[in-house]
Image (tube, rainbow, N blue to C red):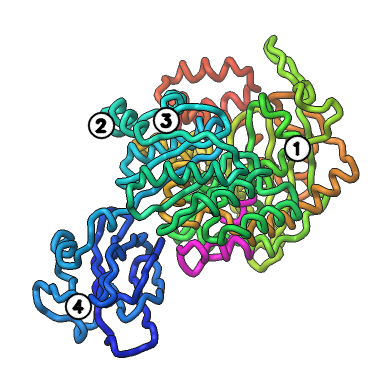
């Protein structure tokens, strides 16, 4: 693909428009109206566009990058129109055009263009400076720096980039590099020397110690950034991996003392985004005193998960699913999140928020909106976020009777004692903070009217997983209902999207067992990512950091989305706290409070993730794929299952050759 330019005539006084076909602009900095355009591809995701102005008002360095997209974007740039197919009457057919003053440089190579236009190479190049605030914290060490290195290892970062760690702690550049190096790993599908790549990456990492609320500290950082930028077009990304109570202090100081003067400035904000409607709105107002909305990137790392991003692809690019995506065919939808560990080390922080604020109001609700939204008019970030916001505005108020909360207690299993939530020294002994919550949500629109969306999230449960489970309606007048006995739910078709771990998509169908009789079996059409794809799945932070650098906002949360999310949960949270509702206790390592099952039964739903057969079958898929029959029998016998369930699992494992 190539962009072309056609002159519309310089005699017209009013500013004209440029149509950029298959591209959207990530940043523009012009000092005068352009008289010609030069475009060239510089990578799989970018176009580099340079502006050449008339000699009397010539502006060197008028260049910027274009992010490839499928959308059309109009921009007021002056007297030219650029499109994928230019008007034939407007373009000269000369094989090489070099008349800069007349605005014709379409046939120039980059070297010829630089020579003819007198553009200095250093002024054309840009650099990205990434500053991680809270660089000494766990999130930075375990996620942010490793994600940045993975992007560098995959050659996804710009040619010129610098990474600065910023914190109050005193540390040298060498000490930062030593700390960071302990958490770096290399991609398994790359052949390039890992150690060499690490050294090259660490050479671009620096450290600056300073206070978060002092402009002088940020001014000193600005000087160091400029030294590394070396006069190039500077783009700056600030990652706030710090407590939310100092977000505004940092943004205020950075906007006044360390923002880019000739490029873009963007800020990534980590959750929590407040703890209710009022505090969230106050945080948004504070940030917008110093930033525009399009500079704020509110990160929810679950939106960067591979299976979450694949959700819209699965739905909108497969004809078999989209017609079924409504109340006519879907009986209920379950979104579950469980961890098999407690709040070890985070009890003090967690007690101020609880599981509803920590998981349900953001991670699960964001997945929920992506699942339930209407088809957006395009893949543009704003079109997708518009549809997500519509879902939230269509939600019925969340009622207390549709919510169950729990808190894990101490439990001894196999001779090992596991502490309860209030056994944590940083947690008050009388704490009522829930570590488990289940809720039934409803959307008041034509597509989803009456369909229960069941959310469940908890800590210290029996397994670690996150999944979306779609249970379809029963087959009307099913000819084979006698084959399933009295439990018709055994014949329910299900679509399961396993977000983590062992990423997979599988569809449960009913199938006849081979043989002369009419015996039916519930089988899985399974796409297990580890078996199907050899490429390692990137970490969510890699995807989101790359999107922030490129200005892609599709996977980040807009302020109106955030407001609507808090409007849904704040009344419930206030009612729980004002009435001092005591959470139901459940043993560490169990399946959670019994009340969650009563909540599901209230809407004639059975939680899919507590189906013992399904969970064990998935374990067999992942862990015993290559085992022989007698080895699989031995594994299952150790579980001491009822004979009927044991026989069923053995039969499914062997006959389906899992």
Q: Residues within 10 Å of mark 1 (few under 14, many from 20)?
A: few
Q: Secondary structure at mark 2?
A: loop
Image quarter of the N terminus:
bottom left
Q: Residues within 10 Å of mark 4 (few under 14, many from 20)?
A: some
Q: Residue at left 69%, top 35%? A: 458
Taking depth in this image into account, of 44 and 513 the one nearest to the observer is 44
Q: Is residue 564 magenta?
A: no
**Residue 23 point in image, percent of width and height:** 35, 65
> Eyeballing the image, is 199 above or below 472?
above
Q: Quadrant of residue 73?
A: bottom left
Q: Residues within 10 Å of mark 2 (few under 14, many from 20)?
A: few
> Is residue 372 visible in this depiction of the protein?
no
Q: Secondary structure at mark 1?
A: loop
| Disc on the earlier residue, 3 or 4 | 4
> Eyeballing the image, is 361 above or below 102?
above
The numbered dot on residue 101 is 4
Label 4 or label 2, whichever lies nearer to me, is: 4
Q: CA distance from mark 1 to mark 3?
A: 49 Å
Q: Residue at left 40%, top 59%? A: 262
Q: Secondary structure at mark 3?
A: loop
Taking depth in this image into account, of 445 and 57 the one nearest to the observer is 57
Q: CA distance from mark 3 to mark 4?
A: 72 Å
The numbered dot on residue 657 is 3
Q: Quadrant of residue 180?
A: top left
Q: Quadrant of residue 156?
A: top left
Q: CA distance from mark 1 to mark 2?
A: 46 Å
The numbered dot on residue 192 is 2
Label 1 or label 3, whichever lies nearer to me, is: 1
Residue linked to disc 1: 352
The residue stretch that appears in magenta: 363-390
Label 1 or label 4, whichever lies nearer to me, is: 4
| Disc on the earlier residue, 4 or 2 | 4
């Amino acid at each position: 693909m190539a962009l072309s330019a056609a002159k519309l005539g310089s005699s017209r006084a009013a500013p004209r428009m440029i149509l950029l076909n298959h591209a959207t602009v990530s940043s523009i900095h012009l000092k005068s109206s352009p008289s010609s355009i030069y475009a060239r591809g510089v990578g799989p995701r970018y176009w580099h566009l340079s502006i050449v102005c008339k000699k009397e008002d010539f502006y060197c360095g008028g260049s910027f990058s274009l992010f490839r997209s499928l959308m059309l974007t109009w921009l007021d740039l002056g007297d030219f129109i650029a499109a994928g197919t230019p008007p034939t009457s407007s373009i000269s057919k000369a094989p090489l055009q070099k008349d800069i003053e007349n605005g014709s440089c379409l046939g120039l190579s980059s070297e010829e263009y630089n020579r003819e236009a007198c553009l200095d190479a250093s002024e054309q190049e840009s650099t990205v400076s990434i500053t991680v605030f809270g660089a000494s914290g766990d999130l930075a060490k375990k996620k942010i720096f490793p994600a940045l290195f993975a992007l560098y290892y995959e050659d996804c970062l710009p040619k010129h980039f610098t990474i600065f760690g910023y914190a109050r702690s005193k540390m040298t550049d060498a000490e930062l590099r030593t700390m960071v190096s302990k958490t770096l790993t290399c991609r398994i599908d790359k052949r390039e020397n890992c150690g060499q790549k690490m050294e090259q990456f660490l050479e671009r990492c620096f450290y600056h110690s300073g206070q978060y609320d002092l402009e002088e500290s940020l001014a000193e950082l600005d000087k160091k950034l400029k030294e590394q930028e070396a006069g190039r077009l500077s783009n700056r990304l600030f990652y706030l991996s710090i407590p939310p109570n100092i977000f505004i202090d940092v943004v205020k100081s950075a906007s006044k003392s360390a923002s880019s003067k000739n490029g873009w400035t963007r800020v990534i904000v980590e959750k929590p985004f407040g703890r209710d409607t009022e505090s969230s709105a106050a945080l948004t107002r504070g940030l917008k005193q110093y930033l525009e909305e399009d500079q704020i990137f509110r990160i929810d790392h679950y939106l960067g998960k591979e299976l979450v991003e694949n959700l819209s692809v699965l739905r909108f690019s497969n004809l078999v699913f989209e017609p079924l995506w409504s109340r006519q065919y879907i009986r209920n939808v379950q979104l579950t999140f469980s961890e098999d560990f407690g709040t070890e080390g985070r009890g003090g922080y967690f007690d101020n928020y609880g599981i509803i604020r920590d998981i349900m109001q953001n991670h699960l609700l964001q997945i929920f909106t992506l699942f339930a939204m209407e088809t957006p008019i395009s893949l543009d970030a704003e079109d997708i976020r518009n549809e997500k916001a519509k879902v939230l505005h269509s939600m019925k108020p969340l009622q207390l009777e549709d919510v169950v909360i729990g808190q894990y207690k101490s439990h001894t299993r196999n001779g090992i004692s596991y502490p309860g939530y209030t056994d944590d020294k940083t947690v008050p002994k009388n704490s009522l903070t829930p570590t488990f919550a289940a809720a039934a949500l409803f959307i008041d629109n034509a597509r989803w009217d009456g369909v229960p969306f069941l959310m469940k999230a908890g800590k210290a449960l029996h397994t670690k997983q996150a999944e979306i489970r779609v249970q379809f309606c029963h087959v009307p007048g099913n000819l084979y209902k006698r084959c399933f006995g009295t439990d018709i739910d055994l014949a329910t078709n299900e679509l399961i999207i396993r977000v983590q771990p062992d990423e997979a998509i599988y569809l449960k169908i009913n199938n006849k067992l081979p043989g002369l009789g009419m015996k039916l079996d519930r089988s899985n059409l399974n796409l297990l990512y580890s078996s199907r794809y050899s490429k390692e799945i990137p970490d969510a932070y890699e995807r989101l950091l790359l999107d922030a650098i490129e200005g892609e906002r599709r996977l980040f949360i807009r302020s109106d989305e955030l407001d609507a999310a808090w409007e849904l949960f704040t009344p419930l949270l206030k009612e729980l706290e004002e009435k001092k509702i005591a959470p139901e206790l459940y043993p560490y390592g169990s399946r959670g409070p019994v009340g969650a099952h009563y909540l599901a039964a209230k809407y004639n739903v059975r939680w899919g993730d507590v189906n013992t057969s399904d969970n064990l079958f998935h374990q067999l898929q992942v862990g015993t794929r290559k085992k022989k029959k007698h080895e699989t029998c031995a594994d299952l016998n150790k579980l001491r299952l009822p004979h009927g369930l044991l026989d069923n699992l053995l039969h499914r494992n062997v006959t389906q050759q899992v």
